[in-house]
Amino acid sequence: MSVFNVVEKFVSINGEGQHAGELAVFIRLRGCNLSCSYCDTRWACTADAPAEEMTETQIVDYVISTGVKRVTLTGGEPLLSPHVIDLLKAFAANPDIFVEIETNGSVDIHPFACIDNPPAFTLDYKLAGSGMEDKMLLSNFDVLTAKDTVKFVCSDVSELDKVCKIVDDYRISDKCTCLISPVFGRIEPADMVDYLIDHKRNDIRLQLQLHKFIWDPNKRGV
């Protein structure tokens, strides 16, 4: 039995992604290997962040107890947790539970995509404004399927040119959903819409973080 450091667990709606607005159980695991300039969960990323130790069985039982069928596994970077594949396999043994992993784009997702009943991935591509673009593992694009998502968080409208180049070079929109999102409070979403219109990008979708509009942007557990 493996043990995981869970810094948060709660039920809310997905604030972003393909399933934005749908109920989900959030499981936030401790630790991250990146330090993005705009990170809004730094408190969960340090090695000494307060956490509850839970086994994969306890986590799955908690999810089942909520009656919610969708799980968002997040962090930090959840795929860095030792033995996280054991947790994914425990979820996979429950076909009524749909698991989505929010991953930062620097960790190889191939081993996790190959299990039976694999999770869906929301894969970040960190642009220059994050300070972490050189950490991106482009081979992850090879295993994406229709249930997956690639997300680009933009610090400036000028970064959208790079977004389009990545989407086109790797034919991402032929494989999965492509989302762009503004760093909250730093870009006017209307400017991003104007870019999509001007460049006729029918294959890229703008998303906003719903939870930051419904609740205080700094509120945890939502």
Image (cartoon, grey):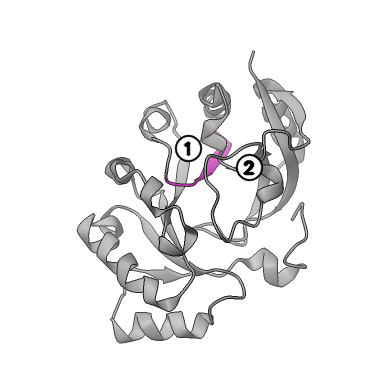
In the structure shown, which secondary structural element does the residue marked by tag 2 occupy?
loop
163 is higher (above) or lower (below) than 72:
below
The amino acid sitting under disc 2 is: Lys
Residue identified by numbered label 2: 69
Q: Which residues are magenta?
A: 94-105
x, y percent for residue 85: 51, 25
Residue 26 drawn in magenta: no
Is residue 135 found left or right of 27 in the rendered image? left
Q: Do the residues under discs 1 and 2 have CB atoms within 8 angstroms?
A: no
Name the foreground residue: 160 vs 22: 160
Counting residues from the start of the chain, the first of labels 1 and 2 encountered is 2
Name the disc covering residue 5, or none. Answer: none
Left/right placement of residue 212 relative to residue 175 reads: right
Q: Which residue is mark 1?
A: 119
Q: Residue at x 73, y 34 (%)?
A: 48
Drawn side of residue 114 relative to residue 47, left or right: left
In depth, the one of 119 and 34 nearer the eye is 34
105 to 173, vertically: above or below: above
> Looking at the image, which residue sits at the far top?
1
73 lies above or below 134: above
How many marks overall? 2
Look at 78% across and 60% down and name the residue there: 219
Q: Is residue 40 above or below residue 200?
A: above
Name the image quarter holding the N terminus: top right
**Dot 2, how many residues are within 10 Å of its Cα: few (below 14), some (14-19), or many (20+)?**
some
Q: CA distance from mark 1 to mark 2?
A: 13 Å
- Describe residue 222's horizontal placement relative to residue 157 as left or right: right
Give the quadrant of the C terminus: bottom right
Image coords of residue 202 (percent x, y): 31, 74
Could you classify mark 1 by the number of other residues whose Cα lies within 10 Å: few (under 14), some (14-19), or many (20 or more)?
many
Q: Residue at x 37, y 50 (%)?
A: 134
Three-letter code for the amino acid on which mark 1 is drawn: Pro
